[in-house]
Amino acid sequence: QVQLVESGGGLVQAGGSLRLSCAASGRTSSSYTMGWFRQAPGEERDFVAAITWGSSNTFYAESVKGRFTISRDNAKNTVSLQMHSLRPEDTAVYYCAAAYRMNTYYSKSEQYAYWGQGAQVTVSS
């Protein structure tokens, strides 16, 4: 069992930056592939980025490549999402998720067993 708590959301102007953090408690997060998803009002929950357990390989949605960076600090049991060049279409609730020793289908939300409560990110034009 692992508990996830996001922080760092807020309001930012287009072109600005924000950094989201996800603190994991319970079992050590180093054995979990960690993902970030987002959900805008009336939309489905979409994959944003993932970082694997072990090798820390990273994967990104096409819409955020080159603008967002996912990273992890296993010593602190945290995962971060650094977001640059934010656009109004990035506005959503961002969720941190964890999947135990997952090696495939990083973009599939159903592969993740544990979820945080979400953090609102609003980008104004």
Image (tube, rainbow, N blue to C red):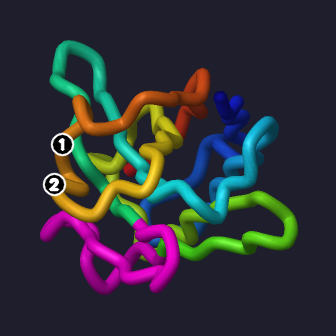
In the rendered image, which quarter contains the N terminus? top right
* Tag 1–tag 2 contact (CB < 8 Å): yes
Label tally:
2
**Is 56 one of the magenta-colored residues?**
yes
Residue at the spot 13% in from the left edge and 70% down from the top edge: 62
Left or right placement of residue 99 versus residue 115 in this view: left
Residue at the spot 52% in from the left edge and 42% down from the top edge: 96
Residue sitting nearer the eye, 45 or 74: 74
Left or right placement of residue 85 versus residue 39 in this view: right
Which segment is the magenta one?
51-69
Residue at the spot 38% in from the left edge and 50% down from the top edge: 125
- Name the element at disc 2: loop
Residue 52's disc is: none
Q: CA distance from mark 1 to mark 2?
A: 6 Å
Q: Amino acid at mark 1?
A: Lys
Q: Magenta stretch: dominant SS?
A: loop
Query: What residue did someone put label 2 on?
Result: 105
Query: What residue did someone put label 1 on?
Result: 108
Residue sitting nearer the eye, 50 or 104: 104
